[in-house]
Amino acid sequence: MIRHRENGWLLAKVICTYIGSIIGAGFASGQEIMQFFALHGRSGLLGVVLATVLFSYLGMLVMFLSITMRSDSYKKLLGLLMGSKAGELLDALNLFMLLGGLSVMLAGSGAVFEEHFGLPAAFGVWLVAALTSLVLWGGVRGVLCANVCLVPLKFFAVAAISLAALLGSGHSGAPALTQGSGGVAGHWVCAAFLYVSYNMVVPVAVLSSLGQVVPLRIGLAGGLSGGLLLGLAIFLVTASEICFLPEAASYQIPLLYLAGRLGASCRWGLGFLIWLAILTTAIANAHGFASRLAPAGGSRYRLTGIAACLLALPLSKFSFAVLVRFLYPLFGYAGLALLVALLVKPLVFFLRKR
């Protein structure tokens, strides 16, 4: 009985860590879903299905490789997938992308505090930087516990508000659903691959650090369940935004617009949950950075995590919407090499064994 309870708790940690590394400020605000899916209209929903399949498969694959290799950072995983030279190049690129993602989270916190809570943006930036450093001070266990406490709350809130807005739209959103105004990458297939591509950078960095602490069966179940739940949340957000086009597209934080239609309390509640999403993704980015440079943990890991927060501060002074619009597609293109390796390498192994 105790064994089953421990396994269930560990499975929840893996699922929450996977989801928490993806549902950040861009996701919970609705901005990145708007850019990658909703603006493609009805075709964007097909993109969501494709992204769900990819997230589920890749989550299982990363956990399988990490556990069988007993990895404690993503450097070993990149070496296996890409080879030594290409792996080193992508390793350096990943470090830059993790810092860039952390900067976006800090900027997002500043935007929420300034635009939603009426407080100085700098306060929001420094608060997330400080809390992220505090969580990393507790090591990998601190990261897992933070995710299992915070991620379910923001996941269910985002899904519930999207579903309520969708059911209360009062129409099918016919013109918006039929034709999109053109989102990222110009085509829904390309947009879906780009979305998964840049979003897998942080999960690969975080999940690969769990290779020595998670059993194989739990890791596979966590990767699959996390991918399916992500797909469900993306579908609900996309469908609700499509129903309120073009009005929703004019907002920096589209989900706040949808929540506002449900009442002031929902709007304020979502503002807080968006901030929680920012915090958990900031933790994931900083942990991925620190675990790569200090895989053994200890004081070096803690100091590296704090250094990552400090290094991310200068870029966080830019607009959150601008960073999402330009950095995220850039990260997507940069991460395509990792995505292709994850999709192709298992096929190569299979053909060699035949």
Image (tube, rainbow, N blue to C red):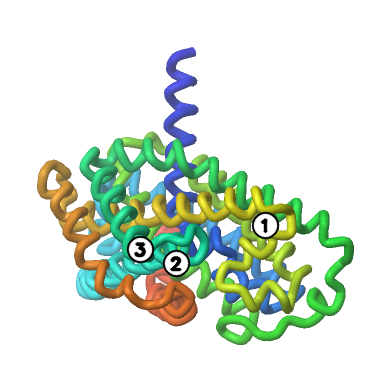
Farthest residue to the front: give it.
118
Farthest residue to the top: give it.
1
**Tag 1 residue:** 259
SS state under label 1: helix
Farthest residue to the left: give it.
299
Q: Earlier in the sequence, mark 3 or mark 2?
A: 3
Work out whether residue 338 can be spotted.
yes
Residue for point 42% across, 42% down: 147
> Pointer 2 and pointer 1: residues touching (CB < 8 Å)?
no
Q: Nearer the viewer, residue 274 or 173?
A: 274
Q: Gap between marks 3 and 2, in whole Å?
A: 9 Å
Residue for point 31% across, 43% down: 211
Q: Residues within 10 Å of mark 2 (few under 14, many from 20)?
A: many
Residue 241 rendering spot, x and y as whole percentages: 70, 67
Q: Amino acid at mark 2?
A: Ala
Q: Amino acid at mark 3?
A: Leu
Q: Nearer the viewer, residue 219 or 331?
A: 331
For residue 111, which numbered disc appears in the image? 2
**Tag 3 residue:** 106
Work out whether residue 220 can be spotted.
no
Q: Earlier in the sequence, mark 1 or mark 3?
A: 3
